[in-house]
Image: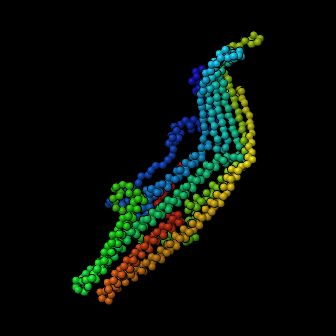
Amino acid sequence: MNRRVVALLTIRAALLALAPLPMLAQNALVPGWFKERFNPQTTEVRQVQGLSDHIVDGKLHLQLKDFLELVLQNSTDVNLTRVDVFNASDQILAAQAVYDPTLSLGFNTLRSIAPQSSQISGASTLSTLTQNSFLNYQQILPQGQTVNAGFDAAKNSTNSAFNFLNPNIASTMNFSVTQSLLQNRNNILRSAPIQIARTQLRITSSQSEAHITDLVAAAAGQYWDAIRARDNIGVEQQTVDLAQKSYERDKKALDLGALASLDIFQSQTQVAERNRDLVAARYAYLQALDGLRRLIGADLTVELRRTELVLEDDPSVLPDRATILPLEDALAAANRVRPELDAAHRRVTVDDLNARVARNLLLPRVDLTLQASVSGLGGDQVAIVGPLGITTPASSSGFGTTLGQVWAFNYPSYGAGVQVTLPLHSRSAQAQLADSLVNKVRDQYTERQVEQQIVLDVKQAIDSLELADASIDAAKQARDLAQKNVEAEQQKYELGSITAFEVLDSQTRLATAESALLNAYVGYQEAYVNYQRATAVLLDGLGMVLETPRAR
């Protein structure tokens, strides 16, 4: 029979023999399998998006909600955090490698020519040609059984006179299953790493969500700092205007001879100092805007760097106080949704699973193996004359005859075996169990620590809101009184009862009061952001979706 046909038939028969097992041609031979194998699921660098939707008349107009949405879309720090879940997902795939089947096939040929010193060799110079084809399949099933299946076909031809089948074709198909009966009976030693990897993916997702929340809260604080810097320009401009009016009055008084020439320098100095503070305030605002550009990716192109940013929020417009829950209600809401607490709880479940694995390793190992095989033989029958003169005529059979004998189970072999392994000392498993229990206690303390931190965060956030609210009322009153004091001091100065120094001092006090009121408003806005972060509602309504890869 043609050698190539023999090899193809061998492969085909082996595939048919392995048909009941996983990974058939419907899975391993389709193009999609190769595509998934060499093109795994991955992520790509996101381009800056969404900025053009907020550009009006060549200016980038932003409110807090718009700004935070752009931060979630374009912030490099946020996108770096998103990538972490892909690494955690890859660990699931790596843990599943223990179930990967292996398929090995091959063909060997050997020609041997050797002189012989014995008549029983059948020839003075023995020439032998051996050709062997094999196909083996091995896999660990999800239930824990180890399956082995194989098919071998060998063709031998020789010039020995004693071979009555020459050439001969022998084939063997074998199958075995091994099941653990005590240690690893429920396959926990192989399934636990997969469960841990899946749990770790959820932990990483929760950690990423918590980190993104912190990044967004910091971005919101940076936004309100920019608002503070913007409105501080107005405060400084007001002080310049007041100082300029005082200087103009002093200048008229000097021209009329009602003011000494040396006294004009005081008001001039005040104007110069206020202009200096105004210039510093303007540049502080520009620097704050540069920080906002970086957070939303508006610093990556020349066009966006040149686009003017317009912040539209007014810090004096306070959020609805009805959204602020009482302390206990806020704590209950935070404990339900804070991702840090969820991650801490899942770490404890991982410790429990590790402890189960360690306890299982302490058990004796008992393996039951069932095995079966079937053989076939064919070839060219040489004519033989028996002792009684009976002649066996020559005949010919090929690979088909051999396969027929295999499929018909004409020459079967089967058996079973039990192997027991007693671990007299399992120090490694004992240490692993002890570490798992210690880690569980540590993670339970960590979980308590997270709970305490949540209580502290929520309580401090509510306290900060109450403080900011009280600060606004006090700052308003101080600003109104400072305004009245400036008007009163100005009247006194016009009547000549006080000097210019008292007038300038009252103006400075007014500027300080205006700045304190601005800081109180911004402080309330920042306290509200911290309250939203503490109760894990900051990302609500921003369209944030943490992309989690498909775990196969």
Q: Is residue 137 above or below residue 142?
A: above
Residue in view at x 71 percent, y 46 percent: 183
Residue in view at x 27 percent, y 81 percent: 264
Q: Is residue 492 left or right of residue 410?
A: left
Res 10 seen here: no
> How far from the left and from the top, in percent, is residue 273?
33, 75
Q: Is residue 428 left or right of residue 229?
A: right
> How far from the left and from the top, in percent, is residue 438?
66, 58
Question: By what rule are the colours in the image chosen?
Answer: rainbow
Q: Is residue 211 above or below residue 248?
A: above
Q: Which residue is more in the foreground, 111 or 473?
A: 111
Q: On the image, which quarter does residue 261 sit in?
A: bottom left
> How far from the left and from the top, in percent, is residue 367?
72, 41
Res 195 seen here: yes
Most extreme residue toward the top is 389
Instruction: Pick the quarter of the image with the N terminus.
Output: top right
Most extreme residue toward the left is 256
